[in-house]
């Protein structure tokens, strides 16, 4: 399986520091695997939820990643569930973090 570009998706709302540590750890691992990563945790602080989701949708449509990578706990996030649905709607493959790491080994 060849993966060049991914978009990270996971829970942010309700987590300390919006779970950014999880996103940045995943980004670091994937970059070491030679994968280009779009990390939504790099967006500026202080936006409304709707603004983040609009930015996410526009980014996913623009970059057309090979996969959207679902980080652990994503099912507890309305935003990540929406990103999952967008992936299906746009024909983008989805992979769970654990599965991607197994493939990369």
Image (cartoon, helix red, strand yellow):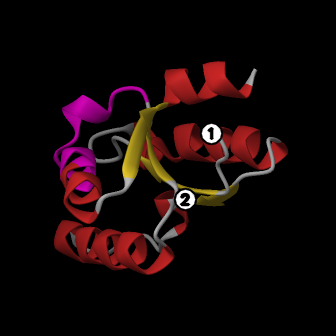
Say above or below: 38 vs 71: below
Cα distance in 3D space between marks 1 and 2: 9 Å
* Residue plotted at (23% across, 59% down): 86
Q: Position of residue 83 (x, y in %)?
A: 27, 54
Callout 1 crowding tier (Cα within 10 Å): few <14, some 14–19, many ≥20: some
* Residue plotted at (50% across, 58% down): 41
Give the residue number, with chain letter if any, for mark 2: 39
Rendered-image quadrant of the N terminus: top right
In this view of the protein, which residue sits in the foreground, 13 or 102? 102
User: Are circles 1 and 2 on residues that touch, CB within 8 Å?
Assistant: yes
Give the residue number, with chain letter if any, for mark 1: 26
Q: Is residue 9 left or right of residue 103?
A: left
Among all residues in the image, which is located at the extreme front?
1
Q: Position of residue 17 (x, y in %)?
A: 46, 47
In this view of the protein, which residue sits in the foreground, 39 or 58? 58
Say above or below: 80 vs 65: above
* Residue plotted at (83% across, 43% down): 32
Q: Counting residues from the N terminus, which is met first, the one under dot 1 or under dot 2?
A: 1
Magenta stretch: includes residue 35: no
Give the magenta range: 72-84
Q: Is residue 16 left or right of residue 50?
A: right
Magenta stretch: includes residue 78: yes
The secondary element bearing badge 1 is classed as helix
Q: Position of residue 19 (x, y in %)?
A: 45, 41
Q: Is residue 78 left or right of residue 64?
A: left
* Residue plotted at (46% across, 70% down): 64
Image quarter of residue 5: bottom right
Residue 4: which numbered mark, if any?
A: none
């Amino acid at each position: 399986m060849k993966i060049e570009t991914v978009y990270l998706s996971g829970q942010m709302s309700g987590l300390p520091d919006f779970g950014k540590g999880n996103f940045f750890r995943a980004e670091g691992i994937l970059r070491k695997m030679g994968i280009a990563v779009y990390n939504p945790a790099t967006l500026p602080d202080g936006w409304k939820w709707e603004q983040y989701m609009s930015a996410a949708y526009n980014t996913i449509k623009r970059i057309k990643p090979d996969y959207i990578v679902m980080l652990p706990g994503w099912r507890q996030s309305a935003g990540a569930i929406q990103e999952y649905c967008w992936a299906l709607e746009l024909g983008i493959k989805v992979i769970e973090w654990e599965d991607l790491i197994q493939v990369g080994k």
